Image (cartoon, helix red, strand yellow):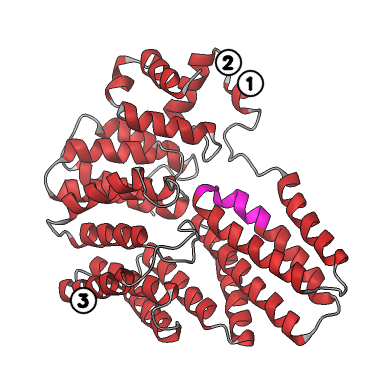
Amino acid sequence: MTVDALAEAFRDAASDRDRRHMPKLEDLRRMIRGYEAGEHVPRGRNRLLYCVVFELTEAELFGADATRPVPMPVTTTDDEIEALELMRRAAASDVGTETLERFEHAVDDLAIAYHRTHPAELLGRIRRHLGYLADLLDARKTLAEHRRLLVIGGWLSLLGATCDIDLDQRDAAVARLRTAAGMAKETGHAEIAAWCLETEAWQALTDGDYPRAVTLSQGAQRVAPNGSSAYIQATAQEGRAWARLGAVRETRAQLDRVATLAGNLPAPDRPEHHYRYDPAKADAYTATTLAWLGDPAAEPYARQVLVRMQAPTNGSVRARRVASARLDLSLALVAAGQHEEAAHETLTAVTSGVLVPSNYWRAGEVISAVEAGRMPLVTDLREAYRELLGPSNDTGER
């Protein structure tokens, strides 16, 4: 069955009530493509519609443990590790330049996979790479090779901490960030050190500790190489924190700085890389910042950003970033008094299957604002949000 036919079948199988609240047909097709590509797993209403259309039970269609994220098959990562080990044994030393280069490329691949992979799946791959790294650290090597291994370990620990934060595993995130920061210090790697502080700032922002987010973002800028991706990201993060504090002057100053810094960047050859700043990310952060600030310009800006993200000119569609852009637009729509469209966009984001726990609070914030407008869609929206949170937390509160 084609994607178009499946989207139509979903609409036909849905109840009248569900059909009224389903995403637009174009968005539904995009969600189905994501499901079929394995980028995310159907949940809630769409999961049941799959069962109805194919006349199969949930267990038959999605497996016995159907409610949990589908894990990355172990063989995928094992193949990556086997390739690294084969390269090492083919070289004339215990570690060797070719093994290190292959390992560095593997780390880049993991950073690129971040945007399209469930954090639990990616974390499993990162752990196995860290295990292999530990074996190499015990092998004979030169001082230069040892340093390169520590840099690899710093990037892996940093990315692992990011996944931990996505999954709301705070203790693990703190431990990994300390490890990454320690390796950055030992190797003198300023960019990893800056990314550690910026990641802490992001965690502080999601925790609602906005003054600390400002302080950490400023610290990251002091450490980062001037004009680097970490420097620009920390500048943008500071702007978001100021917006949450309602500091208009400081927020606009940071937005202007980011626009200048990002405007001088060439388009990266791999824009999906989590640690390489790209113009699309600057646009996304600007939309978030304006929405949080309550700026009237947020609504048209967020709308344009969403359109561009759904049809990028460079790189592939990043589903999680699209879902976040919908939440930005929803918040801006609420401020503009357009509660019905805000509810529709939020429902699309909540049922997309790609929101991670670290972003649930953003959806909850919009839902609380939409509820004040007493829209008919609010009940469905709240039910979808409770389903997203799971049985352990059905209040919608952080």
Identify the image quadrant of residue 358: bottom left
What residue did someone put label 1 on? Answer: 60
Which SS class for mark 1?
helix
Residue 348 percent location from the top left of the image: 34, 36
Separation (CA) of disc 3 from disc 2: 55 Å
Position of 97 compared to 392: left or right?
right
What residue did someone put label 3 on? Answer: 253
Vertical side of 164 occupied by 118: above or below: above
Q: Is residue 43 magenta?
A: no
Tell me, yes or no, whether the two marked residues, 1 and 2, touch with CB atoms within 8 Å. Answer: yes
Q: Amino acid at mark 2?
A: Leu
Q: Is residue 396 visible?
A: no
Q: Amino acid at mark 1?
A: Glu
Mark 3 or 2 closer to N-term? 2
What residue did someone put label 2 on? Answer: 56
Vertical side of 27 occupied by 85: above or below: below
